């Protein structure tokens, strides 16, 4: 048997040195799950408002806050989707509150009406 020593390149998190699994699509910085996702080291962008699968674009905070010129048009397009997502959530939250209020009022008035009758 011939023994071959192989060197395996593993990517390590730029922040803590753990095995990395996520990379910034712009500068290539590596992040482990804890630093990248849980620690919000990576900002994720998806291609549609109603979509929660895996993201198209991953950026580190540095590239997200000061993107290089070639990234700006793409980033703006993805940010527009991201802000619509937030807008919808806020809209829906407000709608839910108003719906609940309307339902409570209808119920109370119906009860009051039936008592009088
Ligand atoms: Zn890490
Ligand atoms: Zn980056």
Image (cartoon, rainbow, N blue to C red):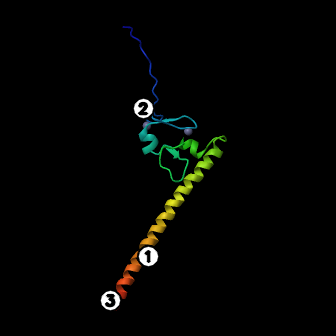
Which quarter of the figure is the N terminus placed in? top left
Tell me what residue is drawn at x 46 percent, y 64 percent.
93
Q: Going from the N terminus, do you reach mark 2 or mark 3 first?
A: 2
Side (left or right) of 55 relative to 70: left
Tag 2: Cα neighbours inside 10 Å, few (<14), some, or many (≥20)?
A: some
Tell me what residue is drawn at x 66 percent, y 40 percent.
70
Q: Residue furthest bottom?
A: 117
What is the CA distance from the residue labelled 2 to the residue labelled 1?
52 Å
Q: Going from the N terminus, do you reach mark 2 or mark 1 first?
A: 2
Q: Which mark is residue 102?
A: 1
Tell me what residue is drawn at x 59 percent, y 53 percent.
80
Q: Secondary structure at mark 1?
A: helix
Q: Secondary structure at mark 3?
A: helix
Q: Where on the picture, by quarter, is residue 6?
A: top left
Contact flag, marks 1 and 3 (Cβ < 8 Å):
no
Mark 1 or mark 3, whichever is nearer to me: 3
Which residue in the protein does label 3 denote?
Answer: 115
- Disc 1 under 8 Å from ligand 2? The reply is no
């Amino acid at each position: 048997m011939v023994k071959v020593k192989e060197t395996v390149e593993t990517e390590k998190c730029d922040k803590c040195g753990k095995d990395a699994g996520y990379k910034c699509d712009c500068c290539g910085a590596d992040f482990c799950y804890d630093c990248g996702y849980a620690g919000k080291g990576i900002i994720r962008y998806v291609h549609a408002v109603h979509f929660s699968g895996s993201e198209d674009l991953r950026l580190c905070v540095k590239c997200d806050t000061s993107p290089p010129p070639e990234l700006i048009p793409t980033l703006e397009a993805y940010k527009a989707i991201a802000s619509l997502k937030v807008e919808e959530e806020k809209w829906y939250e407000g709608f839910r509150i108003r719906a609940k209020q309307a339902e409570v009022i209808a119920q109370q008035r119906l009860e009051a009406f039936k008592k009088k009758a």
